[in-house]
Amino acid sequence: MNEVSASPLSEPVLLILLSLAEQPRHGYSILKDVEETSLHRVVLSTGTLYGALHRLLEDHWIERFEENESSRGRHAYRLTREGRKKLRMEIARMKHLTQLARLRVASKEA
Amino acid sequence: MTRLYRWLLFLYPSDYRAIFGREMTEVFDKAHAATSKRGILGRAAFYLRELTGLIQTASYAQIRIHCEWADRMKRFVSGRAAVTALIFMFVAIVTAIEILKSFAFHRHPTQPMLWHEFLLAVLAGLTVICGGVIGWAILFLLGRSGVHRIANIDTGSRQK
């Protein structure tokens, strides 16, 4: 049985984690990706983005690293194993919810 | 605009600013440049979003820092270090009282009363102050050494 997360993640946090699940990114890249994947519904401010990144770093769900030698001091972010696990749990939770909703709605319509 | 944003970053705690300050300014710069093609309403929405986001997260970061500090102090004060310091202060006060008593009972009758009492008060006061300062120094040095964090170290002994 899949593990299901106890408390749901907020949409911005989920989108940030999804953005980093694909590849490591730096701040602005996360900002743009979140905007695009949410079809311009979630537009993060710089402060909100870094507030969320700060919390995710503290929880060890993501890690910060220097992107490459040529761009010294430029930091990027990537998911940790713990972060990936939490993301999978959240996806399982959402999947369960979607299945339940589909069943209930279908039984009502039938 | 970047200068103003950099100035507003001072609303964040210094540690937060040291880690993210430069990155946040860069991201703001890029996002600001991207809004240049939008109309006046688009730019106004951008500034409003940035301002509210910054105030909200800066307040949150400040509250968290103060809560952490208060929690750390609470744990520290209730620790053994505080008990040691309080014992030290208590001994200093008792010693001061004993000094006052011994001088009062062995006072030479020919000595002027006021001068003698003044000396006693100074001596007792100095003893209490020295006790307090030493007690405070013990607390301060232990706090600086980070010894209170030892209690927070997870040795993994609970994981079976």
Image: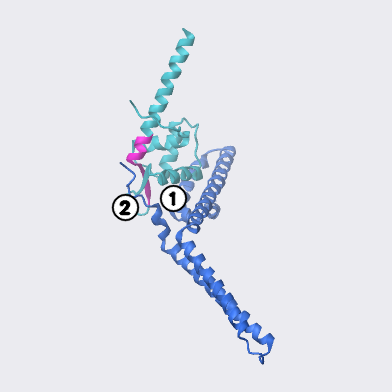
Above or below, B109 against B133 in this view is below
Q: Is residue B85 magenta?
A: no
For label 2, the SS is loop
Question: Toward the viewer: B155 or B62?
Answer: B155
Shade representing chain A? cyan
Report the residue marked by disc 2.
A70
Left or right, residue B21 beside residue B126: left
- What amino acid type should be assigned to the residue bearing mark 2? Ser
Write the residue at 45% across / 53% down: B22
Distance, label 1 to label 2, CA atoms, is 17 Å
Q: Give the magenta part as a residue range.
A: A74-86
The quarter of the image holding the C terminus of chain B is: top left
The residue sitting at the top extreme is A110
**Could you tell me which chain the residue with mark 1 belongs to?**
B
Q: Which residue is mark 1?
A: B23
Residue B7, image x, y percentages: 54, 55
- Answer few, some or many: residues within 10 Å of disc 2's Cα (few below 14, many 20 plus, some between 14 and 19): few
Q: Nearer the viewer, residue B153 or A89?
A: B153
**SS for callout 1:** helix
- Chain in blue on the image: B
Q: Relative to A14, is B62 on the left or the right?
A: right
Residue found at x 41% / y 19%: A99
Residue B129 visible to the viewer: no
Image position of A15 (left or right of B10): left
Q: Quadrant of residue B47?
A: top right
Is residue A42 at least partly visible in the picture?
Answer: yes
Q: Nearer the viewer, residue A81 or A11?
A: A81
Find out whether residue A78 is within the magenta segment. yes
Of B8 and B117, nearer the camera is B117
Residue projecting furthest to the bottom: B110
**How far from the left and from the top, in percent, is residue B2?**
52, 52
